[in-house]
Amino acid sequence: MSFLPRSFVVSKKFSNVAHFCSTTTGGPHTEINSNFHHAFIQNHRQTTLFQKLLLSVGSASVSLLDPSRGDMIAVLGETTGPIALERMLQKMQSSSEGQQILREQPRINSSTVDLQSLSTLPKGTVGRVYIDFLQKNKVTPDSRPAVQFVDDEQLSICHAEVSRGS
């Protein structure tokens, strides 16, 4: 199994995965890396442990009161998930596919995925399941706010990709 945008295969059940992945733009990965680094610098908000605690309590409270507040759920994940993110990063660093994701930092967003093309795929394919999920939940690949409160850039990459489902 490879985690690259053009060769990602989940299982044989998803026979048109290659078509889904071919709807992503290849582009030079150095440009992608540079774009992610720039976004990290632009969006990162340095916080103290006390501030993270306040953000955690506040975002958890709002999330419980209104589970549709994806922005608060994202903040909660960013402020309470460093141990899980570190474990995920270690696992990624220990596999060739994970290393490749960290090196190339592939993106799934509205500029890299042809959503119209995904809606024409047969049911049961990764691309069709993905577009159906987006439509059912009235979101886009860009709906998830930028990671702000994860202090390490590589952990930020892990969090962003898990949150977007890439």
Image: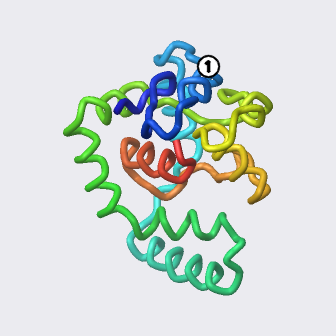
Q: Secondary structure at mark 1?
A: loop
In the image shown, does 132 or 80 lie closer to the viewer? 132
- Taking the spot 52% from the left edge, 49% from the top edge, the residue there is 44
Residue kind at label 1, given as amino acid type? Thr
Alpha-carbon neighbours of circle 1 within 10 Å: few (<14), some, or many (≥20)? some
Q: Is residue 42 left or right of residue 162?
A: right
Name the residue nearer the viewer: 9 or 87. 9
Is residue 23 shown above or below 121?
A: above
Residue for point 37% across, 48% down:
155
Q: What residue appears at the point 40 percent right and 43 percent down from the top-left corner?
A: 153
Residue extending furthest toward the top: 28
Residue pointed to by mark 1? 25
The colour mode here is rainbow
Q: Is residue 18 left or right of residue 135?
A: left
| Residue 76: image location, x then y, percent | 52, 70
Residue 138, horizontal then vertical, whole percent = 79, 56
